[in-house]
Image (cartoon, helix red, strand yellow):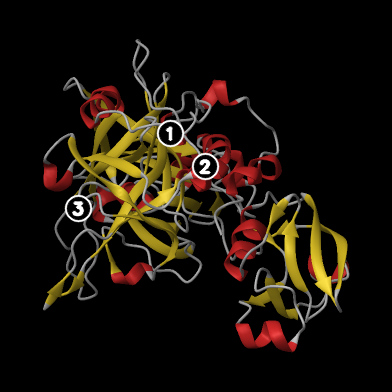
Amino acid sequence: MLTRLISLLALLLAAPVPESVFWTTLPRPARRPAAPLADLADRARPAVVHVRGTSPPEDDGHGEAQSERVSIGTGFIINRDGYIVTNDHVVHNVINLRVRLHDGRELRACVLGTDAPTDIALLKVETPEKLPFLPLGDSDALRVGEPVVAIGNPFGFDNSVTAGIVSAKERVVERSALGSSEHSAADSYSFFIQTDASINLGNSGGPLIDQAGQVVGVSAAFWAGHPMQPAQGIGFAIPINMAKALLPRLRDHGAAPRAYFGVDAQPLEASLVSALNLPSARGALLASVEKDSPAEVAGLQPGDVVVGWGKIPIATSEDLKIDAQLTVPGTRVRVGVLRDGRRLEREVTLRPALSQHAPAIHPSSCALTGDGSLSRLEEIAVADLPPERASRLPGGGVAISAVDGDSAVAEAGLRVGDILLRIGKTPIHRARDVLNAIRAQPGEVIPVLVRRSGYDFWAALRRR
């Protein structure tokens, strides 16, 4: 299933960047005895960091705010300039984001981009000196039984090292059944590397390292088991090739929009292989093709078996899901299919997947720390939205980038990351519009239209 993800990079990068500019991938050495674990740990630990932030209080549904929650996890540096990979669930909706380096220094961090379905996030820290980093490996080349090392901060025990083997690859697991993960959406990708190297709360976002010292996975979750039958030695990591496919877009755009293919596919069971007279069970059987979709325009039909995506072989229907959705919208792909015993090639031009609304801006987004775009009034600061987000809001809007705790803004329930759409009847397009709109609004209470997580609502801002 995941034996093709590294090849996806050729399709995914709309504006390719040499790896040496962003991350380093070293040639995989010929098979050889594993390096001593102590040597691997000594080389890797300086590039592993502790990630910490706080989630603001949220309404519990009864009009009362829950207490602030501290989120802790792990990350690893992939570039000397301070790019850090971690899990999305580690930094989901957090503020006051901090990173503690191996030498004990603590730095403020911001979020360049996140991708909830794959549970990957990219952070950035600023420091005058170059930082140690870990090279990214090739998770496709991993073999079951191969030694691996996990480094992280389980339960706050910094830089803990655990060792084990790759127990399985391409493991499909329901996110809701896992520990250390908060996402259970139906479109989540859960095609994990399974390992018996211990992964616990706090390990999330840390590196899984092969015997060559390269990152092959991002620790994400563990199997909690049943209270009467607790599990041991069942941890899961996101294959690094999946992360590599997304990182350039997270860095440049803050998100990785999905592509739309327009099919429903199912696995090939043994009975279907026989009924359809297929040579093997490898491939994705198309059950339906949506009208006017890229798949239909390309001539694909129900009953076709997709066996190739560009140069990437398709082994299962889950493969097709990954390849189709993670390909950059607008890319043209040659799709190999089996139909009536013959192999055909069809060229598909993928379209952007429909989205109901622009993704919410992260409250710790690096875009909120930009210069020249802030407009401060009393206890509120706003910043212009990144172009990627602004283009998806028909009426414009600006993001709240700072809120003082004891202020009229906080009293109104507004938070960092909320998007101001209107003040009274005045649309807000740029940060500089906010001050004039507030001054022009009569009365002691100012109605403001706000968007949060894709939903709009009015709030009352009282002058002080």
- Quadrant assignment for the C terminus: top left
Can you give x and y, in whole percent of width and height, for residue 334 in the image?
82, 55
Amino acid found under the numbered disc labelled 3: Leu
**Residue under label 2:** 254
Amino acid found under the numbered disc labelled 2: Gly
Amino acid found under the numbered disc labelled 1: Cys
**Residue under label 3:** 201
Q: Image check: 15 left or right of 105?
A: right
Taking depth in this image into account, of 47 and 290 the one nearest to the observer is 47
**Looking at the picture, does residue 192 appear above or below residue 80?**
below
Q: Image check: 168 left or right of 153?
A: right
**Residue under label 1:** 366
Q: Image check: 152 left or right of 284?
A: left
Can you give x and y, in whole percent of width and height, for residue 424 in the image?
48, 56
Say if residue 310 shows up in the picture. yes
- Quadrant assignment for the N terminus: bottom right
